[in-house]
Image: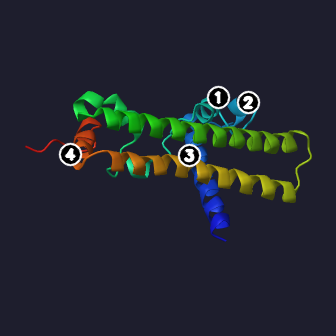
């Protein structure tokens, strides 16, 4: 039950975000989807596909990032300012590599399922059962992908000291340095 509800929630949020981006990206023109007709997978832009294939965060971990749970990539970008120890650097590099490997695997699966969904409609073979199955699978995969990114932020915060987390917040512009 929970997985089904999670899948529905993730799919709904993804749809809403995509719809808002599409509407704003085309200035409210009368033909807002015309620019998408030549995409191999209509639901995914070239940037979406590249991000999924590279294991990028694509703002999936914003609840963590903006609530004092740093990510390993940005912590490593600020390694000197944060005063990372050699052990911390190794831990963060490992976290990033593990996250990226999992994210790439999930991203490829999302692309494949979106491709299957696309093919069903392109081939006029879509039916309710296939649509329900594929959209549920895509929703679960998207939820798993987001969880991978969020869990990595948990691990990163546990790797850093409270002082480093506070410095990270300032370096990333989330908090103002207090005197």
Q: Nearer the viewer, residue 72 or 26?
A: 72
Residue 23 numbered mark, or none: none
Q: CA distance from mark 2 to mark 1?
A: 8 Å
Asked which secondary structure carries label 3, the reply is helix
Task: Give the label, 4 or 3, closer to the camera.
Answer: 4
Question: How many residues crowd mark 1 within 10 Å: few (<14), some (14–19), many (20+)?
Answer: few
Q: Residue at x 60, y 60 (%)?
A: 9
| 43 vs 138, nearest the viewer | 138
Q: Residues within 10 Å of mark 4 (few under 14, many from 20)?
A: few
In this view, the mark in front (4 or 1): 4
Mark 4: secondary structure: helix
Q: Residue 1's image quarter?
A: bottom right
Indicate which label's residue lies in the foreground, 3 or 1: 1
Determine which of the numbered discs, if any, sits on residue 20 in the image.
Answer: 3
Residue at (62% x, 69% y) in the render: 2
Give the mark nearest the N terminus, 4 or 3.
3
Q: Residue 21: x and y, percent? A: 56, 41
Earlier residue among tags 3 and 2: 3
The mark found on residue 46 in the picture is 1
Which residue is labeled 4 in the image? 163
The residue identified by callout 2 is 39
- Between disc 2 and disc 4, the foreground one is 4
């Amino acid at each position: 039950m929970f997985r089904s509800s999670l899948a529905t929630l993730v799919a709904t949020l993804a749809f809403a975000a995509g719809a808002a981006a599409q509407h704003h990206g085309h200035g409210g023109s009368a033909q807002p989807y015309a620019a998408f007709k030549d995409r191999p997978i209509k639901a995914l832009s070239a940037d979406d596909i590249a991000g999924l294939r590279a294991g990028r965060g694509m703002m999936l971990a914003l609840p963590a990032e903006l609530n004092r749970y740093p990510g390993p990539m940005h912590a490593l970008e600020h390694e000197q300012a944060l005063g990372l120890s050699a052990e911390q650097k190794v831990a963060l590099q490992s976290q990033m590599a593990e996250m990226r490997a999992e994210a790439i695997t999930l991203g490829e699966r999302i692309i494949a399922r979106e491709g299957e969904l696309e093919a069903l409609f392109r081939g006029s073979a879509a039916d309710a059962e296939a649509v329900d199955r594929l959209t549920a699978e895509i929703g679960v995969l998207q939820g798993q992908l987001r969880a991978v990114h969020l869990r990595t932020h948990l691990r990163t915060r546990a790797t850093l000291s409270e002082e480093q987390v506070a410095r990270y917040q300032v370096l990333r512009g989330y908090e103002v340095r207090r005197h």
